Amino acid sequence: MAASEGADIRHDWRHSEIEELLGQAFNDLLFQAQEIHRRYFDPNELQVCTLQSIKTGGCPEDCKYCPQSIRHPAGVESEPLMSLEAVLAAARRARAVGATRFCMGAAWRRPKDRDLTRVIEMVGAIKALGMETCATLGMLTAEQAQRLQMAGLDYYNHNIDTSPEHYPSVITTRTYRDRLETLAHVRAAGIKLCCGGIIGMGESRADRAGMLRTLANLPEHPQSVPINQLIQVPGTPLYGAPAVEPFEMVRIIAVSRILMPKAWIRLSAGRCEMSDETQALCFLAGANSIFYGERLLTTDNPAEQHDRALFAKLGLRFQVRSEPARSACEAAGERIRRPT
């Protein structure tokens, strides 16, 4: 149902325009977002992704929201990189419950080349299952991005988290420019971008507008835009931050849809803290992708049974990948595994 790029695809949004959208009358904002959503997507179809932590804890970064940082006493133990067999088993479980994309997260500042080689092996094996692949491994060099592209990685996740102005209040061990540099390497390598942010880290509405402006004015819109609500974990510096007002979360989703009409807008972390009614409004506002499964890296996610019951009430169905695409992936996987 995707339309060709038209007048509503822009990369020149002004901060004032985005703030104006965020402040619109709620019904008008949702109507505008729903109109745009229907031009590019089936309004009752959800893309389903599963996120697996393949290397947990021990991260040297100081992101104030993250329990995997060695700087925060959040009780997350450092674990080694998972084996290929364990990751493949997790991917099979995800596919069995309806996931079409398998996302792998590793708590690194930047992957070592030897670790990247192991991740590349995982990418090939998961693609052989007929699933899309995504990875979030920290910052990448141009050469590392090229290696992942050659392995067939479909998406690379690297969130900008917040606005350029608020970023130093959240992270000091890397800069916003570092973030944008990795995004440029991934884009130049021909890998699709999965890039969004986190709401509820003490930022202002102006900061939220600044984050969305950065995303919408990239040379190419991210193909996936995860919008996360902060999950407050004891021991992290942002534990106790003011909760996000539910209607504000819906507004962020709606404006994301208006600014990036062709992107999959993913309602990501924080769904456990949202009521069914808030989630329903987010889907109405243009969210059409979720993480599915009971864990998101080190935090809880809604139970699969609860999700299925909610989606049934709303008449939402899971996206299904075509069999020809799956067969091609399986063939590619066979070539990867075949001895030379």
Image (tube, rainbow, N blue to C red):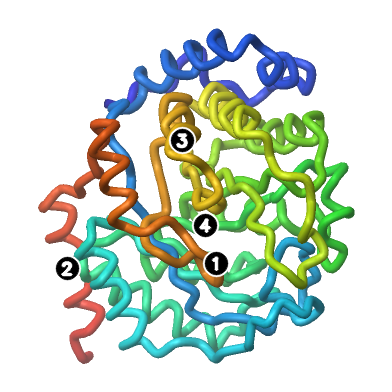
Q: Of the numbered discs in the image, which one, if any, rests on residue 330?
A: 2
Are the two marked residues, 1 and 2, in contact with CB atoms closer than 8 angstroms? no
Residue that mark 1 sits on: 299
The picture places residue 284, in percent across and down from the top left corner, at 42, 25
Q: Of the numbered discs in the image, which one, if any, rests on residue 231?
A: none
Q: Residue at x 77, y 65 (%)?
A: 63
The picture places residue 208, in percent across and down from the top left corner, at 73, 35
Give the mark nearest the N terminus, 3 or 1.
Answer: 3
Amino acid bearing label 1: Thr
Give the mark nearest the N terminus, 4 or 2.
Answer: 4
Q: Of the numbered discs in the image, which one, if any, rests on residue 189?
A: 4
Q: Residue at x 81, y 45 (%)?
A: 202
Residue that mark 3 sits on: 263
Q: Nearer the viewer, mark 4 or mark 2?
A: 2
Q: CA distance from mark 3 to mark 1?
A: 25 Å
Viewer can see residue 194:
no
Q: Nearer the viewer, mark 3 or mark 1?
A: 1
Q: Residue at x 50, y 64 (%)?
A: 300
Q: CA distance from mark 4 to mark 1?
A: 31 Å
SS for callout 2 = helix
Q: Residue at x 54, y 25 (%)?
A: 254
SS for callout 1 = strand
Quarter where residue 165 is shown: top right
SS for callout 4 = helix
Amino acid bearing label 2: Glu
The picture places residue 150, in percent across and down from the top left corner, at 41, 67
Mark 2: few/some/many CA within 10 Å (<14, 14-19, 20+): many
Give the mark nearest the N terminus, 3 or 4.
Answer: 4
In the figure, 85 relative to 330: above or below?
below
